Amino acid sequence: MEKTMKQMQREVDEYIGQFKEGYFSPLAMLARLTEELGELAREVNHYFGEKPKKETEKEKAIEEEVGDLLFVLICFANSLGIDLEDAHDLVMEKFRTRDQNRWTRIEEKEEE
């Protein structure tokens, strides 16, 4: 089942809402984002970089690390009242206007 970002934000909020502690502070969540990003970077480096895993290291999927990062990002946004769909729309508009001629476009094939 496909989920919208609003549904994911609501799902995370319902999950966190069942605990007395609630969301961590913004600074704590920023630290968690940094930690999760580091774990993702480590996995990407193992798969695509020059540093293979040690035989004793547990295998983790990049997909799982991306999921961890997304979960913490949603927590961060929720705690600050940020709608991630609105945030996405803002940044896409910026790319469509400010950066519209920044990159070389792939030429569309001409119809015969």
Image (spheres, rainbow, N blue to C red):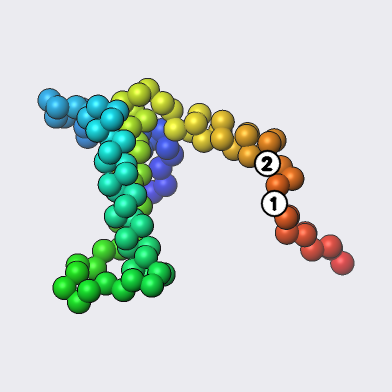
Q: Is residue 51 left or right of residue 83?
A: left
Q: Residue at x 27, y 41 (%)?
A: 32
Position above or below: 111 against 50: above
User: What secondary structure is found at the residue carrying circle 1?
Assistant: loop
Q: Position of residue 22 (x, y in %)?
A: 19, 27
Q: Residue 99 occupies which quadrant of the picture?
A: top right
The kind of residue on which mark 2 rests is Asp
Q: Position of residue 19 (x, y in %)?
A: 14, 29
Q: Residue at x 28, y 35 (%)?
A: 29
Q: Residue at x 29, y 55 (%)?
A: 39
**The C terminus, quarter of image:** bottom right
- Which mark is on residue 83? none
Q: Is residue 48 left or right of residue 18?
A: right
Position above or below: 67 against 110: above
Labels 2 & 1 near each other (Cβ < 8 A): yes
Q: Residue farthest to the left?
A: 20
Q: Tag 1: Cα neighbours inside 10 Å, few (<14), some, or many (≥20)?
A: few
Q: Residue farthest to the front?
A: 50
Q: Which residue is mark 1?
A: 103
Q: Is residue 82 left or right of residue 93?
A: left
Q: Which residue is mark 2?
A: 99
Evaluate whether residue 95 shows in this view. yes
